Amino acid sequence: MVTLAEVFGEPRTFEPRTLEPMILPENNRIPEQVETVHLIAVCGTAMGALACMLKDMGYHVTGSDNNIYPPMSRFLEEKGIPIMAGFDRSHLTHQPDLVVVGNAVSRDNAEVVATGEMGLCYCSMPQAVNRFAAAGKRQVLVAGTHGKTTTAAMLAWILFSAGRDPSFIIGGILPNFTSNYRTGTGDCIVIEADEYDTAFFDKGPKFLHYTPDAAILTSVEFDHADIYRDLGHVRDAFGRFISKINPDSLLVSVDDDPNVTDLVRLGSCKRLSYGMKADSTWRLGEVFIEPPVTRFNISKNGADFGMFRTRMIGVHNLKNTLAAVAVADYSGVTAEDIAEALARFAGVRRRQEIRGEKRGVIVMDDFAHHPTAVKETLRAVKSHFSKNRVVAIFEPRTNSSMRKVFQQDYATVFDPADRICIRKPPLLKKVPEGERFSSEQLVADLKQRGKDAAYFDDTESIINDLAGSSISGDVILIMSNGGFDNIHDRLLKAL
């Protein structure tokens, strides 16, 4: 087994930029008997899913949050879970048996302080998932900088379609289930394994809390600049994830990412590769783009595994499919059942999701924000709509994209687009002045490359421009990890 030090020098400790002390460490535990659970910051994607799963399991669940909005608020209300607005110690007067603290919550949060003063037991979201949702189940994890939501969703759907009735908790809404979670009766749970930090009292990545029977690693790149210092810091985290996978468990990893191929040597577990190389265990073969579907061939260990159909677009999504197919096959699902499931897979909300069409103009929504995700999404859309004009709309709003760490990278990833609209980052004040990303500079760099690019101060001006400049046949691809001021519906109305 290769060591971390052999791959990239002496291992670093995984520390936050500002180390915050734990509150009453002796109470960071889950008691044996739990009936009532309160979740602080319950409207987060994973926290809301956990709350619903706990309700399904018969626990009395309450929650609080500053930002109460659909779709999670609707899911919680439909489950009969009370959501209290804001954070206040009065929300804990019922003395819950357990408080689950979301990773967006700081140590000076009023409910966190009250938890400590009242001596209540508390834990992080991954700790709660392990104790309740994943208890007694085989854990199937999907990790990586890119593609983990789509890959996890596809795998969960394949297992469900094959009658395995899996549980899952995923960072996106699956139209096939109209949900991002499921409390199934089967023997496994599919978990989107996040590398983001766990909680203010546990700054290690979430995925280190889980013990997978099988895991997928899609990619490793620098991201989350508010948490990680550099690529080496990211590699440290993924290296620890790989090295702690049990020897009798399976790791399915992409074989065209140099960081991944380097890091998998740290593992002592069983390994399978996927990709487009001649020696890939699971290999993508011929691809036929036949809108609205794509047909593609898969081989396993050099032998034909089958021809499949999907409505997902882009080579990156076909590679995600390979990973899901590999784990489904490992779980005993037949090629025929996999093919039927893939043909009926409806994707994930906000991943190349067509929000509507007006005047012959297609408005598409995508979560892309990292330079690699932007590049691959644009390549996919342009390959599928090769005869259309593709207009890319980009809002940098993540903690990484609002920093200048990717300033030069973004200038090279918009090439497939015919026109590009870049919005001013809406939350730029959160970033120290010397570290801020410049949308104006990006537009200047794009123009230098001969691209038709424009800068916009706000969302309204983008909508006004597109309402007047769009022509029938245009595909408007809107990329942001946020709501983007409801630009999709407002643009469709304007059109």
Image (cartoon, grey):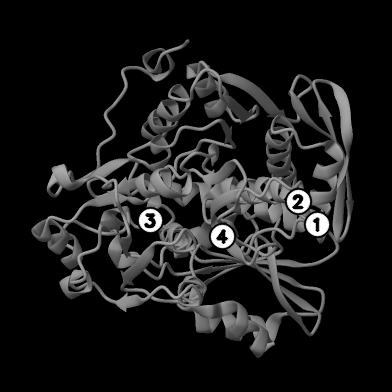
User: Mark 1 falls on what kind of element?
Assistant: helix
Residues at marks 3 and 4, CA–CA distance in whole angstroms: 24 Å
Q: Are marks 2 and 1 in contact (CB under 8 Å)?
A: yes
Could you tell which of marks 2 and 3 lies nearer the N-terminus? Answer: 2
Q: Nearer the viewer, mark 2 or mark 1?
A: 2
Quadrant placement of the C terminus: bottom right
Q: Nearer the viewer, mark 4 or mark 2?
A: 2
Label 3 to label 1: alpha-carbon separation: 35 Å
For the residue carrying disc 1, how many other residues have a C-alpha within 10 Å: few (<14), some (14-19), or many (20+)?
some
Query: Who's the residue at 48% across and 67% down the image?
Result: 482
Residue at the spot of label 1: 344
Nearest-to-viewer mark from 3 and 4: 4
**Residue marked by disc 4:** 180
Q: Nearer the viewer, residue 180 or 377?
A: 180
Looking at the image, is 480 positioned above or below residue 21? below
Three-letter amino acid code at disc 2? Ser
**Residue 399 badge:** 3
Res 33 visible: yes
Find out whether the residues at labels 1 and 4 contact each other: C-beta distance under 8 Å.
no
Within-10-Å neighbours for mark 3: few <14, some 14–19, many 20+: some
Distance of label 4 from label 2 (alpha carbons): 16 Å
Question: Where is mark 2, residue-wise?
Answer: 161
Disc 1/disc 4 C-alpha distance (Å):
17 Å
Q: Give residue 236's position: percent from left, percent from top.
A: 38, 29
Query: Depth-wise, is mark 2 or mark 3 nearer the camera?
Result: 2
